[in-house]
Image (tube, rainbow, N blue to C red):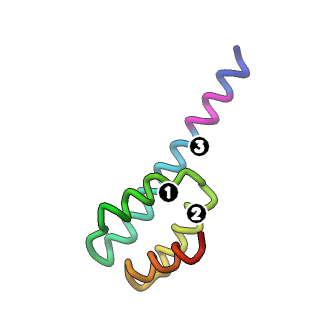
Amino acid sequence: MCRALEEWKADCKAEGKIEAKVEDIIELLEDYGEVSDELKNKIFLQNDLTLLKRWHKLAAHAGSIEEFVNQINNNI
C-alpha cells in the first residue's frame, strides 16, 4: 500500500510540474501577442517534461510566436 501511495505522489508531483511548465510557456508567448487556441492545445497536450523544458527555453528566446512555432515544429 505504501508503494502505491508513493507512486501516486510521484505522479501528482510530475503532473504539477508539467502543468506549471505549460503555463510558463504560454505566459512567455503572450508577451508576443495572442496565442492561438491551436498552439495552446498543442502545448497543453504535451506531457513530456523534458520536451516542455526545451520549449520553455525556446519561448524565452524566440522573437515572436511564429519563431517559436517554427522552432518547435523543426525540433520535434
Between 31 and 48, the one lying in front of the other is 48
Mark 2 nearby-residue class (10 Å; few <14, some 14–19, many ≥20) = some
Give the residue drawn at x 44%, y 75%.
69
**Depth check: 12 or 65 in front?**
65
Please give the name of the residue rendered at 32% of the width and 74% of the height, measured from the top-left corner: 31
Residue picked out by circle 3: 14
Q: Position of residue 58 (x, y in %)?
A: 52, 75
- In which quadrant of the rendered image does the C terminus lie? bottom right
Please say if the residues under marks 1 and 2 sit with CB atoms less than 8 Å apart: yes
Residue corresponding to mark 1: 21
Which of pointers 1 and 2 lies earlier in the amino acid sequence? 1
Residue 51 placement: quadrant: bottom right
Relative to residue 49, is residue 13 depicted above or below? above
* Marks 2 and 3, the one that precedes in the sequence: 3
User: What residue do we see at 27% from left, 75% from top?
Assistant: 33
Crowding at dot 3, Cα within 10 Å, few <14 / some 14-19 / many 20+, comes out as some
Which image quarter: residue 68? Answer: bottom left
Question: Which amino acid does the dot numbered 2 rest on?
Answer: Lys
**Residue 49 placement (x, y as % from top left):** 60, 54
Instruction: Residue at 44% x, 61% y: name it.
Output: 24
What range is drawn magenta here? Answer: 7-12
The reply to whether callout 3 and callout 1 are in contact (CB within 8 Å) is no
State the image coordinates of residue 20 (x, y, percent, origin top left).
47, 52
The label number, if any, that marks residue 5 in the structure image: none
Q: Which callout, 3 or 1, points at the residue further toward the start of the chain?
A: 3
Side of 64 where 12 appears, left or right: right
For numbered disc 1, what is the local secondary structure? helix
The kind of residue on which mark 3 rests is Ala
Residue 3, above or below 57: above
Q: Which residue is mark 2?
A: 53
